[in-house]
Image (cartoon, helix red, strand yellow):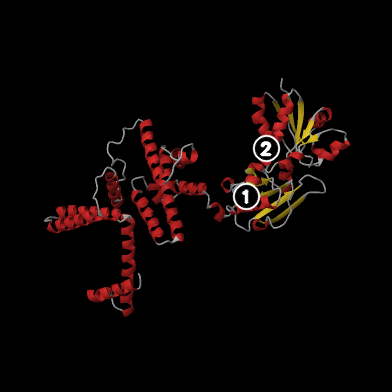
């Protein structure tokens, strides 16, 4: 019959912090195992004649802490598996930053070993007192050896534990700098609650790893921020602002918007972003992406008010879709190249339609967005080309273009001319495909080029002190040609 592992905490400081029940247990136990002898209580245990063994040798035998803690847990489970009752003592509280205890709790039941976790004072108790933290205001504790910026909430009191050395401190600094300004005040504290050894020092974040002030008992404290520049970068701040704009004390214009009234703005903002991409203006790209995001969050807020969905549903469905449609990344599937990925994506989409009870696509052209028209025309032609319904060469397209141009000039009514113009544009889109270009981007670039050159013509006219209308077309063409020569 398997035995029991009783887990106790030695507290954050000397023997005065050990609970009476833990003290009695240590004095009566036959087999005591310490995670490490690097703790102020250990010398007292020796003076009291309390025998124990430690796992410090395992720290030297493994390259990372996860392996060390796994080895400790395995050793304890093997010993208890023979029916023994062990006392496993760890620094602080057994359930605070003790990975080996987590491993015991996960593996003990399947090995038939009872894991009995008792109490113990946590270093957090001392940290709250020394650093003036009231955790009810909002508190988070994170592991310095695996700190990720995505988990840092600047509105909370943050304690980063296990900052053992300068290397860990450097990683912690870089993660914090993704959220806080470089000069943000942080506190490095070590040996809290250990008389004569306690060290507390405040400094700017950028200086966190500049001195070797770290040991096994070091933590970094980051106070909550009220800085607008920091808080405004958070996604939840954005959603709160938009909810306020839509609320009773918000903006009359925002309150009256609907999904239908906002449709044109989403298109406009998307095109403005594409314009910034075309100009390689990264500042503008960041701003225009923000405007696109505004439309997304605003639509989600409207839907939330109507009881249909909210932004979390939007994000959740998107994340699930990305994982589901990338089995070659998140699953066991494989993909050799981008074309293979695209094929798998389409197959997964078709399977999902079937699982939802939706009818199978009846046409190759199903599912193509209705606008913008240039993009739709390109996609329609690409789909048809998959089954061979396409011109054979760019020369065939040129013949078709000339044919459509002639038909346009022969049209005898506004309706017919519009129809023939559509045919001409559709054929021009085919030519962009054969040249490996993007019709939408090509036309956007033509618009940008026209804009630059026409502004140059306006500038030339303004330099004369006359209005643009005062010049002949011949003169305007000369300035236009000058713009071309200048590379505008």
Residue 195: give x, y in percent of width and height. Answer: 82, 46
Would residue 335 be found to the left or right of residue 373 on screen? right
Q: What's the residue at 69%, 25% (across, down)?
A: 113
Of helix, strand and loop, which one carries label 1?
A: loop
Q: What's the residue at 74%, 22% (across, down)?
A: 83
Residue 406: give x, y in percent of width and height. Answer: 15, 58
> Is the residue 186 above or below the residue 110 in the image?
below
Residue 99 is labelled as 2
Q: What's the residue at 66%, 40% (across, down)?
A: 66
Q: Which of the two residues, 152 or 307, is positioned nearer the viewer here?
A: 152
Q: Quadrant of residue 398?
A: bottom left
Q: Earlier in the sequence, mark 1 or mark 2?
A: 2
Q: Quadrant of residue 336?
A: top left
Residue 417: give x, y in percent of width and height. Answer: 16, 55
Would you say residue 125 is visible in this rendering? no
> Is the residue 406 above or below the residue 168 in the image?
below
Would residue 292 be found to the left or right of residue 176 on screen? left
Residue 169: give x, y in percent of width and height. Answer: 67, 51
Residue 224 is labelled as 1
Would residue 470 be found to the left or right of residue 153 on screen? left
Q: CA distance from mark 1 to mark 2?
A: 27 Å
Q: What's the residue at 41%, 37% (across, down)?
A: 308
Residue 434 is labelled as none
């Amino acid at each position: 019959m398997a035995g029991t592992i009783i887990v106790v905490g030695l507290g954050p400081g000397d023997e005065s912090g050990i609970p009476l029940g833990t003290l009695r247990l240590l004095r009566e136990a036959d087999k005591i195992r310490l995670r490490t002898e690097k703790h102020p209580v250990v010398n007292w245990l020796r003076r009291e004649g309390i025998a124990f063994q430690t796992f410090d040798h395992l720290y030297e035998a493994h390259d990372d802490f996860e392996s060390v803690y796994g080895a400790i847990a395995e050793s304890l489970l093997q010993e208890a598996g023979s029916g023994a009752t062990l006392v496993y003592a760890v620094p602080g509280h057994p359930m605070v930053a003790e990975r080996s205890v987590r491993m015991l709790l996960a593996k003990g039941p399947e090995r038939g070993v009872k894991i009995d976790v008792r109490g113990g004072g946590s270093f957090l108790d001392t940290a709250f007192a020394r650093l003036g933290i009231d955790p009810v205001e909002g508190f988070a504790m994170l592991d310095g050896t695996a700190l990720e910026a995505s988990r840092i909430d600047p509105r909370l009191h943050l304690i980063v534990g296990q900052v053992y050395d300068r290397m860990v401190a450097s990683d912690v600094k870089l993660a914090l700098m993704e959220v806080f300004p470089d000069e943000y005040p942080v506190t490095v504290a070590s040996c809290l609650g250990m008389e004569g050894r306690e060290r507390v020092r405040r400094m700017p974040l950028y200086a966190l790893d500049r001195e070797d002030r770290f040991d096994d008992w070091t933590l970094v404290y980051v106070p909550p921020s009220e800085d607008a520049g920091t808080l405004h970068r958070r996604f939840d701040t954005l959603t709160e602002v938009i909810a306020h704009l839509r609320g009773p004390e918000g903006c009359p214009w925002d309150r009256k918007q609907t999904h239908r009234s906002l449709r044109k703005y989403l298109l406009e903002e998307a095109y403005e972003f594409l314009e910034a991409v075309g100009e390689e203006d990264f500042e503008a790209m960041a701003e225009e992406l923000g405007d696109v995001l505004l439309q997304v969050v605003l639509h989600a807020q409207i839907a939330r008010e109507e009881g249909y969905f909210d932004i979390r549903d939007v994000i959740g469905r998107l994340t699930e879709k990305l994982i589901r449609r990338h089995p070659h990344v998140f699953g066991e599937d494989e993909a050799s190249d981008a074309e293979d990925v695209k094929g798998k994506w389409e197959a997964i989409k078709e399977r999902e339609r079937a699982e939802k009870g939706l009818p199978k696509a009846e046409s190759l052209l199903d599912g193509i967005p209705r606008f913008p028209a240039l993009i739709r025309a390109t996609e329609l032609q690409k789909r048809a080309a998959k089954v061979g319904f396409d011109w054979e060469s760019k020369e065939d397209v040129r013949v078709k273009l000339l044919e459509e141009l002639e038909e346009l000039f022969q049209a005898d009514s506004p309706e017919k001319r519009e129809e023939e113009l559509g045919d001409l544009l559709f054929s021009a889109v085919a030519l962009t495909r054969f040249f490996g270009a993007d019709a939408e981007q090509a036309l956007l670039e033509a618009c940008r080029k026209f804009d630059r050159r026409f502004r140059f013509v306006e500038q030339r006219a303004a330099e004369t002190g006359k209005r643009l209308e005062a010049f002949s077309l011949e003169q305007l063409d000369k300035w236009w040609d000058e713009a071309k020569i200048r590379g505008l």
